[in-house]
Amino acid sequence: LISFARDPGDGDMPEPDSLEHYGDGLLWLKGQQIHAVGHFAELSPSLPKGAEVLDYRDKLIMPGFIDTHVHYVQLDIMASYGRQLLDWLNDYTFPEECRFANHAHAEALSNAFLDEMLRAGTTTAQVFGSSHPGSVDAFFTACQKRQLRMLVGKVLMDRNAPEALMDGASGIADSERLIEDWHGTGRLGYSVTPRFAPTSTKTQMDAAGALLRNDPTLWLQTHLAENSGELDWVAELFPGSRDYLAVYEEAGLVGPRSTFAHGIHLDNGMRKRLAERGANIAFCPSSNLFLGSGLFDREAAKQTGMAFTFASDIGAGTDLSGFGTLKAAYQVGQLGGQPLTAWQGFYGLTLGNAKALSLDSHIGQLAPSLEADFVVIDTQATSLLSRRISHCTTLGERLFALMMLADDRAIYETWAGGICQHRRDEV
Ligand code: GUN
Ligand code: FE
């Protein structure tokens, strides 16, 4: 059983008391919550008579993985060949998102996406729908049925997109209706979702900012500085703003609950402004490699105090798995001379992402009174993994082997809200 209590630091060894590791752990659930965590021998005598005890000997239990930036409506365009961002949006993404006008399609894809996400060990995500409000109703409904903690929003897009996807003035009214119906209902939260600066008018972005001012418990998700063609386009569309980030600042979109996907092409001034506002950049390594967008600079983020999170960014990402995201993050890091430790990786996927989304009072650790969202990992899932792990002598080596070599097959079970949501087929 492994759970981080705070940031383990950048060293080869985690900082003292940043990590709890029980070789013989007991995770005691009561309803939807964690009741206690500790050594089996110490805790088990106080279990009530008749308590159901599940034996996961030889398995590793960790908090459920969190994905801070993903598009459920792009599940079926993963692995679309040969384009960089702006052409990829026009040629693949926008046509696909048009299909979400159909409610039955939105329902089917919501469930397909959640099945895949849980199979990969992810229990919470911050998710883009399409511009159709029904796509978000369908997704929230599917999450509510499964009692998942999830953040979702309807894409706001009132220019520079196909007619069928643009929302105009109804975009804000539809967002308000979705907030009213869903935000704070059970484990669900609403994330205001202007797609990115090129597809929203100044009027729409200002109105999105007004929603956030009215209710500081809302989240904000958008894209920032992903691709060089995008940067040129934003400079052309907003000649009065000093840089890309300023466009969002002027609309009141930059705050402690704001997630900006990518943030590859930033200078230290912008990084410091993001740090001052407490916003986070979603680092989406498999997407950045797939679209050829560039290499995120973790070292610059650290130097300027800018928070970053780990995310898949499906459908531009190539892997829904948290393991796959960490593997790509390691590869991106290596190209910049910044190898990612397994401690940083797994801390980021769990407590780090939870903190950046202000969800750490609910999820991100295995600790009493937190919600029972966790993964049961099978380190013997494949012969290759089993072989490599048998040659590891330390926990750090085992975690690093998982981050580089594991996939869905290593997720034995995924639990959320105290419910076993996914159990792997026998391998
Ligand atoms: N920028 C604007 N929209 C998108 C999107 O759907 N995916 C990615 N990766 N970047 C974007
Ligand atoms: Fe994205």
Image (cartoon, helix red, strand yellow):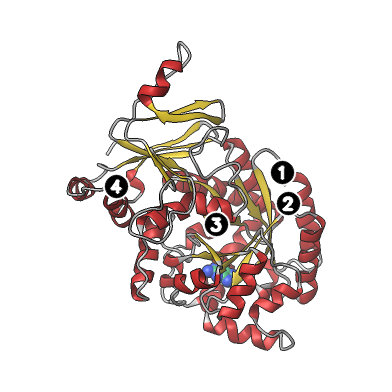
Q: What is the number of the mark on residue 303?
A: none
Q: CA distance from mark 4 to mark 1?
A: 38 Å
Q: CA distance from mark 1 to mark 3?
A: 18 Å
Q: CA distance from mark 1 to mark 2?
A: 9 Å
Q: What is the number of the mark on residue 184?
A: 1
Residues at discs 3 and 2 in contact (Cβ within 8 Å):
no
Q: CA distance from mark 4 to mark 3?
A: 26 Å
Q: Indicate the position of residue 92 as horizontal and vertical percent values.
A: 52, 70
Q: Is residue 84 visible?
A: yes
Q: CA distance from mark 3 to mark 2?
A: 17 Å
Where is mark 3, residue-wise?
Answer: 68
Q: Earlier in the sequence, mark 2 or mark 4?
A: 2
Q: Please, is residue 133 above or below residue 340 in the view?
A: above
Where is mark 2, residue-wise?
Answer: 217
Q: Earlier in the sequence, mark 4 or mark 3?
A: 3
Q: Please, is residue 117 above or below residue 233 in the view?
A: above
- Secondary element at tag 3: strand
Question: At label 1, which amino acid type do we have?
Answer: Gly
Horizontal arrangement in the rendering, residue 406 relative to residue 348 (left or right):
left
Horizontal arrangement in the rendering, residue 248 relative to residue 228 (left or right):
right
Residues at discs 1 and 2 in contact (Cβ within 8 Å):
yes
Q: What is the number of the mark on residue 395?
A: 4
Residue for point 48% across, 78% down: 84
Question: At label 2, which amino acid type do we have?
Answer: Thr
Question: At label 4, which amino acid type do we have?
Answer: Leu
Given this view, does label 3 or label 2 mark the residue nearer the observer?
Answer: 2
Question: At label 3, which amino acid type do we have?
Answer: Thr
- Secondary element at tag 1: loop
